Amino acid sequence: MLYTQSTAITTRQTLTFAPFTPADIPALLPILSASPSRTCDFTIGGIYLWKDYFMYSRQIVDGTLFIKGVAEDNLEVPAFSLPVGAMPLAESLGLLREHCTSNGIRPLLSAVPADRLDEIRSSINVAEVSELPDWADYLYEIEPMATFKGKKMSKKRNHVNRFYSDHPDAIFEPLTTGNIPDALSFLRNHSTPSPDKSITADYDIMETAYALDHFDDYNFEGALMRIPDVGVVAFTAGEVIGDTLYVHIEKMDHDINGSGETMSSSFCRYMMERHQELRYVNREDSSGDPGLARAKEAYHPVALLRKYNVLLGA
């Protein structure tokens, strides 16, 4: 399939990167949907919510997406995502290495999924591999996340029971253009930037607001939890690729006991009803935030999807 000028993406055997725009999303979706890995970096949310932070730009060549940015562990170092798409990996990596050689750039790949390392090594010479421990994604089975059944989930289940005991009139609503202003108001009232927060936390607030303002441009589905006479107490949004739900946004009122757990389980049940093929939930990485890492571990992931920097050899 050839992408015309109307998509703002050209098809030719050179790499000349340009900024991501919402107009690119229809062309990107089929490519990202074919990614063999479950890491969040190969999703619309994983790209667009972080495109300014990691300075992403892109080009599609022969149905293959190339992304230029910076290393996840060092924003001063230019790096590239692993190419994904129709082109054989050996060919796409060779093209990327030629681009780096021509432009005096180290051929560094960042956020490479662990399950692609062997394929990379068999496709091209690799000089160095190093793990990115702060950026591993947390993967869960969706059914336990939807029901909180079993001994391991008893604390989460108790929080949900407490929430409904305290707020029996709580209302779950799909996120729509009609209630997005309420979610935005909640975000602004409960996400005040603080010196104690990380840079990524403040950036996340800004990008969440942008995503809500442009919700129809993204391939997202979401929901919110509302308590009458209180208002919105939590909201979430994500996207589905294959058998995995990627939860890109989770916000809750930490003063309302159980609001986060109730929102999370309700959203998983809602998405399972809409997408029968779902088996997993990717709740993404902790971005090096110890508190966020502990919160994600408390839901008992079935796997950590580890990522690496990979320096290509000559």
Image (cartoon, rainbow, N blue to C red):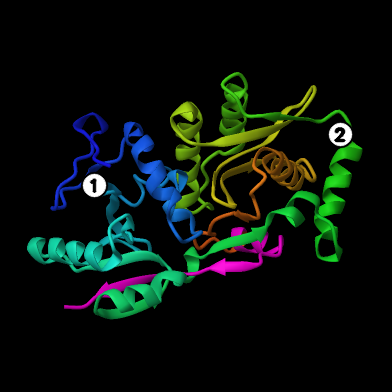
At x 10%, y 60%, the residue is 103
In the picture shown, does residue 101 fall above or below 223? below
At x 24%, y 40%, the residue is 2
Corner quadrant of residue 155: bottom right
Question: Where in the figure is residue 275, as x and y percent of width and height?
Answer: 64, 42
Question: Where in the figure is residue 218, as x and y percent of width and height?
Answer: 46, 34
At x 49%, y 66%, the residue is 134
Q: How many marks?
A: 2
Q: Which mark is residue 256?
A: none
Give the position of the C terminus as an image quadrant: bottom left
Give the position of the N terminus as an image quadrant: top left
User: From which residue to which does the magenta span run?
Assistant: 292-314
Q: Which residue was labeled with disc 2?
A: 167
- Residue that sits furthest to the right in the current view: 165
Q: Which residue was labeled with disc 1?
A: 59
Please indicate, yes or no, whether residue 302 appears anywhere in the rendered image.
Answer: yes
At x 16%, y 52%, the residue is 15
Amino acid carrying mark 1 in the image: Gln
Q: Earlier in the sequence, mark 1 or mark 2?
A: 1
